[in-house]
Image (spheres, rainbow, N blue to C red):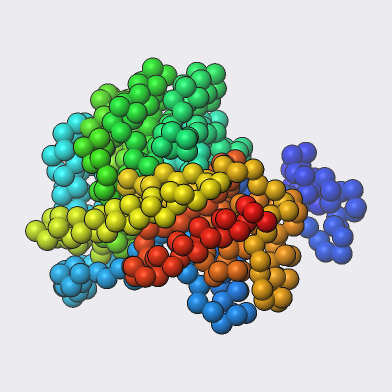
Amino acid sequence: MKLTTTQPTPSSQSGVAAAADGGLQGSGRDMRMNIVHIGAEELNYEIRQIAEVAGRIQKMTGREIYWENIGDPVQKGEQIPTWIKDIVSEAVYDNSTYGYSPTRGLPEAREFLAARSNAQGGVQITPDDIIFFNGLGDAINKVYYMLRREARVIGPSPAYPTHSSAEASHAGYPPITYSLDPHNGWMPDLDELRNKVKYNESIAGIMIINPDNPTGAVFPREVVTEMVEIARQYDLFIVADEIYANMVFNKQERYATIAQLAGDVPAIALKGISKELPWPGSRCGWMKVYNQGTHPTFQKYVKSILDAKMLEVCSTTLPQKVIPKILGHRDYPAYLAGRNAFYKKRSDRIAEIFADCPGVIVNPPDGAFYVSLVFTAELSSKMNLKIPDPKIREYINALTPDDIEPDRKFVYQLLASRNICVVPLSSFVTDLQGFRCTLLEQDDERFEMIYASIAEAIREFLAS
Ligand SMILES: Cc1ncc(COP(=O)(O)O)c(C=O)c1O
């Protein structure tokens, strides 16, 4: 039967409304049916939204903004070594880098990555267990998009929102989470995880980000082993985002990849070059699949991800072409070690700067390049930072109604009063109040100034 606006589908909310007012909504016409995806409300990426407010303030004041919000080392001034640029330049002159590549990715890149993964020990893979994507964001979306609607993946809280949003959007329900505890070095609450898995039969997978964004925590092998045990007991699969796997700068000996720990449990490890090279603009990431051969349903699911990728033809070719040459280069380990030493220096200094700052907990990061500070003091809607410029004050006041999350208010006011842009922790799927910053500032003096200024703002806010 052909549907018209006067014959609404029973499930169409806007169609029902349209029938009630004769097909018109207010002064305009609405759609035949509700075309908005059931999970649309779950899509939220505050990390970039806050940048828009910062850009507006920059325009209004003409003052420089200190961008502590975005995890792009290139944007923060990290220089790409000449030997990497030489390899990329050479690839630019190779005609084949302008063509499509196989859907899974170039065989030589997958062979190289499979051999590296296998050399670490643990579950062994073949090049066909690797699929390339247009950045890890693309892989993350496919992981959740291709899951059956009822199948849920429990993830950490706080969490990098691309995972939680994509998962929640696929399900049409808010994310299901296990807590990372700031009072326990951001370690996962394994009892909570076990209980939620036990009592919620829709949970089909466990997601872990290790090293973690936004906390900078590195979960040691015994913690991940327990998570694997839970997965094994309840026949779940694991999604391990390991984009920061080679960026552990404290207690490296405690870290292990999911390949080393998964045993016979089906798992997907997600990797990429956005942070490690760093080359986020390459839009290049990949998925490594473990134990699909022994788990037919998991294998079918992975095949559906590959089939979805096939509809897009392939992922970016040039980065795949240069990955073996760059990651396999003799200078690569020293280059990475140098960057990690820099982040360690920043992490150590953050521990010192906030050691005696009242009202916040700081767990200095062990990996990745983020730190999340959590307010322990009770926050109230009466707390404020002074914003001297009346125009900026008015603009920020309009963005911060009384019922706004207090950490969001702190973040907006920090931006308005000190031009420092950080991200509220409440936008990382958590009830915790706080904010995330990065360790990426290249200039020592600016770094000191920014973090001293943040510490001062915390004191002012809590005392107000
Ligand atoms: C944990 C994590 N996974 C994935 C990504 C996205 O990476 P890509 O640039 O490859 O899409 C990020 C980016 O910040 C991240 O922090």
Q: Position of residue 135 (x, y in %)?
A: 37, 56
Which image quarter holds the N terminus? Answer: top right
Which image quarter holds the C terminus? Answer: bottom right
Q: Is residue 281 visible?
A: no
In this view of the protein, which residue sits in the foreground, 224 or 151? 224
**Residue 227, placed above or below residue 320:** above
Residue farthest to the left, as pictured? 330
Taking the spot 50% from the left edge, 64% from the top edge, the residue there is 453
In this view of the protein, which residue sits in the foreground, 229 or 102? 229
Q: Quadrant of residue 264?
A: top left
**Residue 330, placed above or below residue 365:** below
Residue farthest to the right, as pictured? 21
Q: Position of residue 369 (x, y in %)?
A: 36, 54
Count of numbered circles in the view: 0
Taking the spot 57% from the left edge, 55% from the top edge, the residue there is 459
Q: Horizontal placement of 231 versus 115: left or right?
A: right
Q: Position of residue 70 (x, y in %)?
A: 45, 61
Taking the spot 78% from the left edge, 49% from the top edge, the residue there is 14
Q: Horizontal placement of 378 versus 364: left or right?
A: right
Residue farthest to the bottom, as pictured? 62
Q: Is residue 127 visible?
A: yes
Q: Position of residue 4 (x, y in %)?
A: 79, 51
In this view of the protein, which residue sits in the foreground, 280 or 407? 407
Taking the spot 65% from the left edge, 47% from the top edge, the residue there is 379
In this view of the protein, which residue sits in the foreground, 40 or 210? 210
